[in-house]
Image: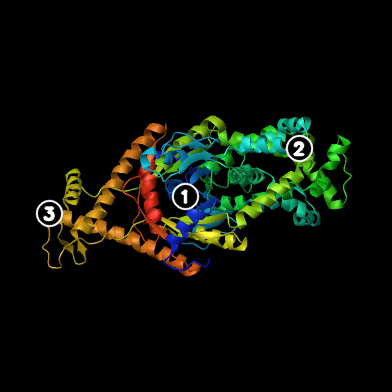
Amino acid sequence: MLLDDLLRRRLLLLSGKGGVGKSLVGTAVALAAAERGKRVLLVEIDAPKEAARFLEAPPVREKETELVPRLFSLNLRPRGVMDEYVRRMVKLSPIADRILGSPIYDRFFAAAPGLKELMVLGKIMTLEEERAGWTGKPKYDLVVVDAPATGHGLSLLKVPIAAANAIPVGPIGSNARRILTLLRDPKKTGLVIVAIPEEMAVVEAAEFHRMAVDEVGMHAVAAVLNACHERRFSDSEEATVLRLSRAGATGRLGRDVTLDQALVSARRHVRRRKLGRFYETRLKRALPVPVVTLPFLFREEIGRAEVALLAERLAEA
Amino acid sequence: MSRRRGKPAEALRAALAERRILVVCGSGGVGKTTTAAALALEGALRGRRALVCTIDPSRRLATSLGLSSLSGKPRPLDLSRMGPAKGGALYAMSLDTKRTFDALVERYARDDEAKKRILGNRFYREVSSALAGSHEYMAMEKLLDLSGDERFDLVVLDTPPTRHALDFLEAPDRLLSFLDASVLRYFLRPYFVAGRLTLKVATKTGAIAMKLADRFLGLSFLEDLSEFFLAFESMYDGFKERAQKVHALLRDGRSAFLLVASPSDAALGEALYFHERLREKRMPLVGFIVNRTHPEPSAGPTRRDAPKPDLPASFRDRLLQVHEDYRTLRRAEAKAIGRLEVDTGQAPILVPELESDVHDLRGLHEVGRALLPS
């Protein structure tokens, strides 16, 4: 079972081309885990707090917030993480205040390449390592990270390598090495690659997988093909749709729908459904991991009911 | 911003004929790359020597041009079967961050010795390659470079998703700010001057910052870093000049921006956010493009009293249901687009979802026709 396999990990990183519904899938994974009784933390990075919107909860600030039972959400703002780090390192708060208020700090933070990424990953590692009080048990059973879209997602994951190379000594260098160890540990960390049934999304998914494995040394656990149009007609009915459509069939189908209009919609659907199947095969061939498909949702708004539906699909996969 | 409703395609047509640089921005997955490639193709077909360049680290552009890969060198595409107007040509490239950075160093380094010092510096080597952030710095540099390239008279620039594209707008200023000589003197020079850890900095805060930096980063890294900055100090004026040129290039009549979205709240929200920032920065906007809409299919010559087609009832019901589903989608799209129109006072160009995926020049031309209906 796919979900069982996902839940054996401590850290799941979701990545995929922009616009594939990564945040929605991430929220669904987190919800599915929470419904299995896990304490889950869903981390968004500098994002417009999507998870809370999907779950119809008030927006999440930079504090861990329980959106539904056992499902916590956190929005990481790189600058906030960096400030927190400085405060922790400089124990005297007046001095920390002066550093944080200085224009040099501002400029350094804005311009230093890779610093934001390293801070964010460091914070994620801290969250994974967090223990609840004196029990020594992990605070969260699972941390799900809604990572940036593939191109920048890969940059994010490569930063600790670059940092470990550039900074051989000192706490930042050693932090970078610890982050790398966590990212590369197949027992703890898994990549979940999200795509939709479209050429570029699938090409990028395959490319991302290859680079994450070859260049970062990470391991993928699953791929999610989101927004697949599910079958509505039998094969022979689909053939009828295409035939009638070609023949320019007319007639009145409903009160305000003519047959030719409905056939345009049906043809769109049939084409999308077939593309879904086609790209599912492509994705399965390209990635050596289980591929799960999630349905396209014809809704005016995406809310809790829709997330729950996707979570259910994940649990069944 | 003064464009009136109902004229978005005209504005785009004019921009495609007159501007030298078109910057295409939007959030991920909205068809930005395809739009950029389609616009460059339409420019070429109308007789311009067009180049489409992606700064996105992922290789989307190649796919939509039907190629397996692109490099930092502009590659001509064969338009012979597309019948371009006289003089029209299309080139495609992707940004090679590392090589652009190296070229910049080679251009501005005082001498061979300085050049070697920078190119061999450990910090430089890590920063100039695939690290996030340097893409944006170098994209601006490349854009400036291309704006003076005689081979092209139209450069269409594809950009990374919105929030990163903002980094991109601010890159020249930030790079300057980072390399600012006075800041370096304040922050890093003591390391280089003494060759070992000394803290002769001007203020107490500075001293603490130094101590902190040493604790976090270690002395050897700071030495690399200060060497890097010192070497760059000599190039600072050159960089500054370049950044000012970029600044001017993006604000004068040569350039214009296009904001691309899909008909969803999230994508349109990002476009709106970008729109605000462009206004703040006084950068010229051509308009909004909303890709992949699902317009209501027009009814054919069916009469009101036409009979029901002879199909099984359950099949008919499902045909109606699918149609109803697309109507739901359309309502969601209309709502989102309506909000954009209210907020900006502009009607976007709507590009309906195509019957097939775009992955060759023909497909791109179809997109182009939807963008610029004749």
Which dot, 1 or 2, sits closer to the camera? 1
Q: Which residue is mark 3?
A: B312
The first of marks 1 and 2 along the sequence is: 1
Q: Earlier in the sequence, mark 3 or mark 1?
A: 1
Q: Quadrant of the N terminus of chain A?
A: top left
| Label 3: element kind | loop
Q: CA distance from mark 3 to mark 1?
A: 43 Å
Q: Given the image, on which type of amino acid does mark 1 rest? A: Lys
Q: Is residue B160 left or right of residue B347?
A: right
Q: Position of residue B77 (x, y in %)?
A: 44, 37
* Residue at image location 37% in from the left, 34% down from the top: A284
**Protein image colouring:** rainbow
Question: Label 2 is found on which chain of the structure?
Answer: B
Residue B187 at x, y percent in the picture: 81, 46
Q: Is residue B124 above or below residue A131?
A: above
Chain identity of mark 3: B
Element type at mark 2: helix
Q: Residue beneath label 2, please?
A: B228
Measured in 3D between alpha carbons, the distance from the residue under mark 3 to the one under mark 2, in whole angstroms, is: 76 Å
Q: Nearer the viewer, residue A12 or B265?
A: B265
Q: Are marks 3 and 2 in contact (CB under 8 Å)?
A: no
The subunit letter for the residue under badge 1 reads: B
Kindly identify the amino acid type of the residue bearing the numbered disc 2: Phe
* Horizontal relation, residue B308 to residue B360: left or right: left
How many residues crowd around disc 2 within 10 Å: few (fewer than 14), some, or many (20 or more)? many
Q: Sequence-wise, which precedes: disc 3 or disc 2? A: 2
Residue indicated by mark 1 = B32
